[in-house]
Image (cartoon, grey):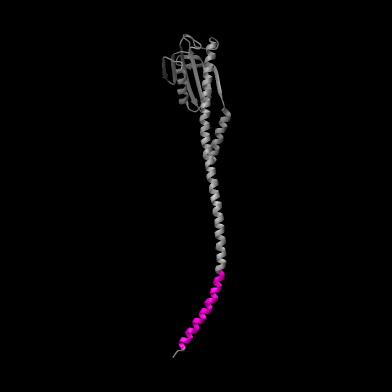
Amino acid sequence: MKKVLVSTLMFVGSLSLFAQKVEVSEGNENFSVGNKPAVIAVFQHDDKDKVEKEWKSLIKDFHPENVSDKKNEYFFDNTKFTTISANTIDVYSIVLGKNDEIRLVACFDLGGAYASSSTHSKEMAYFKVLIKDFAIKMTKDYYEHKVKEATKALDKLTDKRTDLEKDNKDLEKDIVDYKEKIKKAEEKIEQNKKEIETKKTEIGAQQKVLDELKANQGKVK
């Protein structure tokens, strides 16, 4: 029980520290094509594989011609972000996970130039919103999963408490029954003591009768 309590408190502490943490910023990151301006998202999640799967699914909605995975970097070739450009855009992205925290970095090749706020503010603003919305969605997914786990743990603890309360009621009933049995046994003992004294008197009288009969028997000639 102490281990469960400590684990629960540690988990609650970690949630207090990182609760609802969704950070999206811009900075230079290293990709297979070199050091490029990128959108960087940091958010909570404990399943890197799931985040990668959901990220690939999101970008596939923009109909890339090809998707490849090389050394943990996903490349989406000729992706069509028609809201901001009539031209296709190449997307490079890396997902890293550690200690229930995900770091997603992505750069966008607009065709000869990589998107950055200084040169392509409209495009970069769009990508930041796209990635932040994704990060928020995945953070909500993380909390939904954690809520389910915490609910299960609470249900188990509640069931255990209910079992212990029932066990206590049964034991209390047993104590009442045992006390009643003890009381009856004590009363029986006292009754038996009186009957024993009575039997002693009766035995003495009977022994006297027997002795007299034996004496009379010896006198017969």
The one of 180 and 47 positioned closer to us in this rendering: 180
- Please state the extent of the stretch shown in magenta in the rendering: 193-218
Q: Compared with residue 96, is residue 189 higher up or lower down, i.e. above or below?
A: below
Q: Is residue 165 above or below residue 216?
A: above
User: What residue is rendered at 52% in x and 76% in y?
Assistant: 203
Q: x and y percent of residue 66 in the render?
A: 41, 15
Q: Residue furthest bottom?
A: 221
Look at the picture and state if 218 lies above or below 206. Answer: below
Question: In this orientation, which residue lies closer to the viewer: 20 or 30?
Answer: 20
Residue at 54% in and 37% down: 154
Q: Position of residue 52 (x, y in %)?
A: 46, 23
Whether the magenta-drawn stretch holds residue 35 is answered as no
Residue depicted at x 51% and y 36%: 152
Q: Position of residue 70 (x, y in %)?
A: 42, 19
* Residue 210 is covered by the magenta coloring: yes
Percent x, y for residue 12?
A: 56, 33
Magenta part, dominant SS: helix
**Foreground pick, 205 / 131:** 205
Number of numbered discs on residues: 0
Q: Quadrant of the C terminus?
A: bottom left
Residue placed at 54% from the left, 33% from the top? 11
